[in-house]
Image: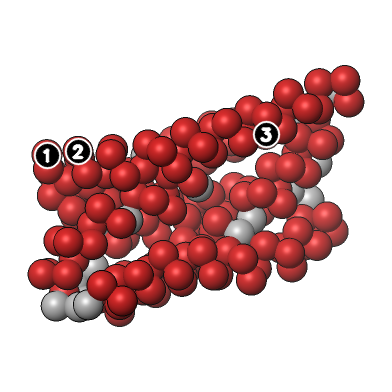
Amino acid sequence: SHFYGLCLPPMFLVWQHAFHVSFAELGMTIMLMSGTTAVLQTPVGFLVDRFGARPFLISGALLMSLSIATMGLATQFWQILVLATLSGVGNSVIHPADYAILSGSVDKDRMGRSFALPTFSGNLGFSAGPPVAAFLMLAMGWRGTLLTVGLLGVPVVLSIVLQSRILND
């Protein structure tokens, strides 16, 4: 989720010319993605507590990755904005769901380490997003980059589904 949040800014220069939009309009992509996540994260946390984390984690991660992939097919900037919002909806479930699963699956003696790993991974995602997206954009253009990085989330979701039997929430 952290990677997806920062894989979009390298697209801005190309999107500015492709869609004839200002930098302020381009910034709305990150604002909508992050703002939607911020607004929905607490209510989704209550839903996770009530109905369980697994279905939310699976559906949210899938929605987020498919939204990013579909941005590669966008022909109008408003489509990017809608997809950024949908990606934010998907992203809003990640921390309530993964922390609920960690709390239910990990022995209390190892809780600190178990929470440190996703924190470290998130920081890696933040730092890897821009250079990976920029490199891929040079190699395959912005459309190919978004399709590729978005669709790479699908095997991650499949691994969550296949391993979900060992996850408690």
Query: Which percent across, then down, holds residue 153?
Result: 43, 42
Under mark 3, the amino acid is Ser
Determine whether 44 is above or below 120 in the image: below
Q: Earlier in the sequence, mark 3 or mark 2?
A: 2
Displayed quadrant of residue 102: top right
Determine whether 76 is above or below 44 in the image: below
Residue receiving disc 1:
139
The C terminus, quarter of image: top right
- Dots 3 and 2: beta carbons under 8 Å? no
Q: Earlier in the sequence, mark 1 or mark 3?
A: 1
- Please identify the residue farthest to the right as the structure is shown: 108
Tell me which residue sits at (20%, 78%) in the image: 21
- Dots 1 and 3: beta carbons under 8 Å? no
Label 2 vs label 1: CA separation?
A: 6 Å
Circle on res. 164: 3
Query: Which percent across, then down, holds residue 140?
Result: 13, 43
Tell me which residue sits at (46%, 71%) in the image: 32
Label 3 vs label 2: CA separation?
A: 33 Å
Label 1 vs label 3: CA separation?
A: 35 Å
Residue receiving disc 2:
135
Under mark 1, the amino acid is Ala
